[in-house]
Amino acid sequence: MKLHFWGAAGTVTGSMHLVQFGRQRMLLDCGLYQGRRKEAFERNREIPFDAEGVGAVVLSHAHIDHCGNLPSLVRAGFDGPIYCTSATRDVAARMLLDSAKIQESDVAYVNKRRRRKRQTPFEPLYSRRDVSRTIQCFVPVDYERSFHPLEGVRGAFRDAGHMLGSASVELDIATNGRSTRLVFSGDIGRHDLPILRDPQVPSDAEFIIMESTYGDRLHAERQRTVEILLQVSARTIQNQGKLIIPAFSVGRTQEVVYHLNQLWNEGRLAKLPVYVDSPLAVDATDVYRAHPECYDEQMVDALFDETDKDPLGFRDLRYVRSSSESKKLNELAGPAVIISASGMCEGGRILHHLKHHIEDPATTILFAGYQAPHTLGRKILDGMPEVPILGRRYRVRAEVEKIEGCSAHADREGLIGWARQAQAAGRVRKIFLVHGEPEAASSLAEELAQQLGAQVEIPARGDTFQLG
């Protein structure tokens, strides 16, 4: 059996790992690589293996860096099943349609300028038609239930606690007369995360493909997140400005809203209109409401105990779906909070809000999630004085803040704890660290080797390993 690492190897985004045994091939995730625009487009466009030769895909969860390039895989000839949890299917369907729509919209906007300059127009990576074909391939499977993606393979999903429907994957693969258990962690969540259950640890793992996003750091206390939200909200009112929060439509948006909802119910949040400006976030919130099987006890209690029975809504909160209403937000008088996608500021409505407000000193831009290198969000967070937005350059005069406590990823201690439990519950022979920048992966590898005596590899893109 061989493992081929084609994404999220030496970097955080673009999760894509190919498992080959005999003549069969199975793909774990197929996400979008996010980084420098030209490099990202070229890498996402070219599937680095024979798509028609892949028999099945097993999808850990619906974040765009894990599922976002599935339509390119289908476009390249894949027509097999895509296994995932039912919540992941529902979220991913909306994520992918939104991704295609944003690509088409952004390309149309940029092409207006290119045509005026007599430059060759761009094409989107994939279309909504490609997404429709992809959605038809989804095969939902409940947590803890066995499924058989290919002959000689038994799989099962365990709750990863990272986002709605997220899973770690157990795969028992029969080769050469014996069965080998390969575990793919997906993205590992945090304990005591609002809304979701705590992550489960798969058992009897021999080989583990494990994420390492925060392998070199610890998260701030969650209470600090709430205090920063209060502080920046107060500053927004005082400055009569706007609080712009770039947030992933699925997961991060709902968590920020959950915290604001708590503050509002406690009477600590001053009267301040809050807008969630993302059709996908509106849809995703509806999906959250439709999947209580993923909730933790605190979320279940809130459904019964709150006056409005809605932990994802309060009186001053408005969900914005139409583009016309979105445009009106940039004409608002007085202070307001605008939560909009994408989380790394690489596309979507957040670009238009930044374009209108980034040069205003009364504005605060609050980052609530990881920003990959070379993305617009990372450039702003790193303090670049001038940044490109939709083909033009803008001075960064807004205040820039970040909150660490909203991360849905386990931190260094959480990752080590997860690996320790997996080792205690199995016979781990080797751990492959993916989905992390080099410094984070190297730091975690050293700790896993020192504390657990684990054999650890940090694959680069294109690396192949023989298991056995």
Image: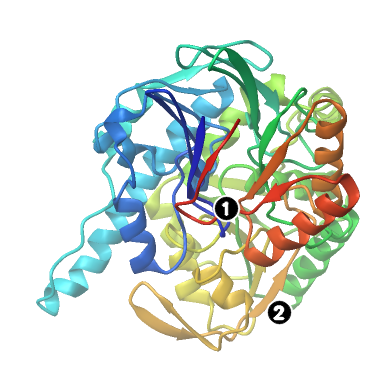
- Taking depth in this image into account, of 311 and 17 the one nearest to the observer is 17
What amino acid does circle 2 point to? Asn
Q: Position of residue 31 (x, y in %)?
A: 46, 45
User: Along the polypeptide, which appears first: circle 2 or circle 1?
Assistant: 2
Mark 1: few, some, or many residues within 10 Å (few <14, many ≥20)?
many
Q: Residue at x 18, y 73 (%)?
A: 114
Q: Which residue is mark 1?
A: 459
Q: Is residue 449 placed above or below 345 in the rendered structure?
A: above
Q: Residue at x 86, y 39 (%)?
A: 420
Q: Quadrant of residue 439?
A: bottom right
- Taking depth in this image into account, of 187 and 276 the one nearest to the observer is 187
Q: Is residue 96 placed above or below 117 in the rendered structure?
A: above
Q: Position of residue 258 (x, y in %)?
A: 75, 43
Q: Quadrant of residue 401?
A: bottom right
Q: Position of residue 78 (x, y in %)?
A: 30, 30
Q: Position of residue 237 (x, y in %)?
A: 74, 71
**Distance from the alpha carbon under mark 2 to that under mark 1:** 48 Å
Does 238 sit left or right of 352 as displayed? Answer: right
Q: Secondary structure at mark 1?
A: loop
- Taking depth in this image into account, of 68 and 156 the one nearest to the observer is 156
Q: Which residue is mark 2?
A: 239
Q: Residue at x 82, y 69 (%)?
A: 231
Does 137 sit left or right of 401 as displayed? Answer: left
- Taking depth in this image into account, of 307 and 113 the one nearest to the observer is 113
Q: Secondary structure at mark 2?
A: helix
What amino acid does circle 1 point to? Pro
Image disc number at residue 86: none
Residue 357 appears in the rendering: yes
Q: Residue at x 50, y 64 (%)?
A: 345
